[in-house]
Image (cartoon, rainbow, N blue to C red):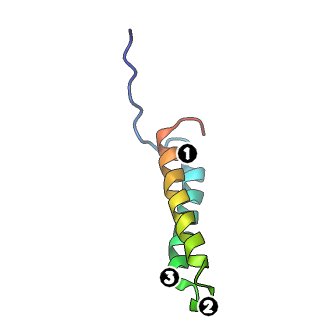
């Protein structure tokens, strides 16, 4: 049996999706603090978007499918 090597987290060939995922994370993180108190429920959507963007960044770094 051959051993499978674990792939390193590299950005080779993934700069554009990584850039837009980071931009989305930055947008969600800033909107958590910049939303008016009247629209307080939108903070939950921004927090969920931040979680999704962090998971997307991890996926982009781990896989070679992109």
Residue 65, image x and y in percent? 59, 35
For marks 2 and 1, give the CA distance: 39 Å
Work out whether residue 2 or residue 48 is closer to the camera in this orientation and state it: 48
Which residue was labeled with disc 2? 38
Q: In which quarter of the image is the N terminus?
A: top left
Chain-order first, disc 2 or disc 1? 1
- What residue is shown at x 58% (from left), y 89% (from top)? 36
Give the crowd class for mark 2: few <14, some 14-19, many >=20 residues within 10 Å: few
- Indicate the secondary structure of the residue bearing disc 3: helix
Q: Are marks 1 and 3 in contact (CB under 8 Å)?
A: no
Which residue is most to the front? 41
Query: Which of the two discs, 2 and 1, sits closer to the camera?
Result: 2
- What residue is shown at x 40% (from left), y 21% (from top)? 4
Please determine whether, in this image, residue 25 is positioned above or below residue 58.
below
- What residue is shown at x 39% (from left), y 37% (from top)? 8
Which residue was labeled with disc 1? 14
Please determine whether, in this image, residue 58 is positioned above or below residue 51.
above
Chain-order first, disc 1 or disc 3? 1
**Disc number placed over residue 33 in the picture, else none:** 3
Chain-order first, disc 3 or disc 2? 3
Q: Which of the 4 image quadrants contains residue 53?
A: bottom right
Give the crowd class for mark 3: few <14, some 14-19, many >=20 residues within 10 Å: few
């Amino acid at each position: 049996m051959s051993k499978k090597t674990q792939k390193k987290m590299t950005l080779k060939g993934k700069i554009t999706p990584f850039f837009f995922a980071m931009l989305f994370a930055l947008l969600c993180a800033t909107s958590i603090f910049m939303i008016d108190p009247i629209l307080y429920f939108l903070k939950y959507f921004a927090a969920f978007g931040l979680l999704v963007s962090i998971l997307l960044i991890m996926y982009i770094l781990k896989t070679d499918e992109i």
